[in-house]
Image: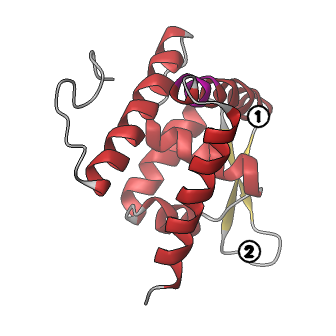
Amino acid sequence: MQKTPPLCGIRDDSSFPMLIRQIRDGLLYQIERQLVDSGLAINYSQHLVVKIIAKNGPQMPGDLARYLDHNAGAMTRLLDQLEDKGYVRRKPHAQDRRALTIELTPAGNELWRKMSQFIEHAQELALHDLKSTDRAKLFDLLKRVRDTLDKTP
């Protein structure tokens, strides 16, 4: 984990991608700091795997790898690490005996509960100075930008 907030002292308010990146990095820094402070040894890629499974149910390793833009070897190592920590387990796929699915263990579900609190805390910290109407407007504007990019070939 970084010792200081990301991009500390570097500001480029004229670049939309840089501003989005700085916000993302700041949120990740806050979440990772809370994970470390709570004694949970988990990195951001591991966090994403737990989040995906918690929100969408058991996943196949290949689908997780595509979502995280990891190759098969990197995904296997990541899943090995999570399995060694007791957060996930591999189970045979219900329809395809050659395939596996990855699911959360009870410890993984508890980890997700804690991580959700850290995510909410980081979001609240980031939005603290905005009134509820400003928050709603910000979310609306960001969704519109996302949807525009989604529609663009």
Residue at 51% x, 40% y is 46
As drawn, is 10 to the left or to the right of 26?
left
Q: Nearer the viewer, residue 112 or 25?
A: 25
Question: Can see residue 39?
Answer: yes
Q: Is residue 58 above or below residue 32?
A: below
Proximity of marks 2 and 1: CB atoms separated by less than 8 Å = no
Few, some or many C-alpha atoms within 10 Å of disc 2 (few <14, some 14-19, many ≥20)? few
Q: Residue at x 49, y 37 (%)?
A: 81
**Of 83 and 36, the residue lying toward us:** 36
Res 103 visible = no
Q: CA distance from mark 2 to mark 1?
A: 26 Å
What is the secondary structure assignment of the residue under circle 1?
A: helix
Q: Residue at x 56, y 73 (%)?
A: 147
Picture coordinates of residue 133, whole percent (x, y): 68, 40
Q: Position of residue 112 (x, y in %)?
A: 70, 33
Where is residue 8 drawn, in percent x and y?
21, 24
Q: Which residue is mark 2?
A: 97
Displayed quadrant of residue 95: bottom right
- Find numbered disc 2 in the image and state the secondary structure of the residue it sits on: loop
The kind of residue on which mark 2 rests is Arg
Q: Which residue is mark 1?
A: 109
Q: Which residues are magenta?
A: 121-125
When the figure is inspected, residue 45 is found, relative to residue 66, above or below; the finding is: above
Q: Position of residue 142 (x, y in %)?
A: 53, 57
Q: Is residue 6 magenta?
A: no
In the picture, which quadrant includes the C terminus?
bottom left
Whichever of labels 2 and 1 marks the residue nearer the N terminus, that label is 2
Q: Is most of the magenta stretch helix, strand or loop?
A: helix
Q: Quadrant of the N terminus?
A: top left
Q: Amino acid at mark 1?
A: Asn
Q: Is residue 69 left or right of residue 142?
A: left
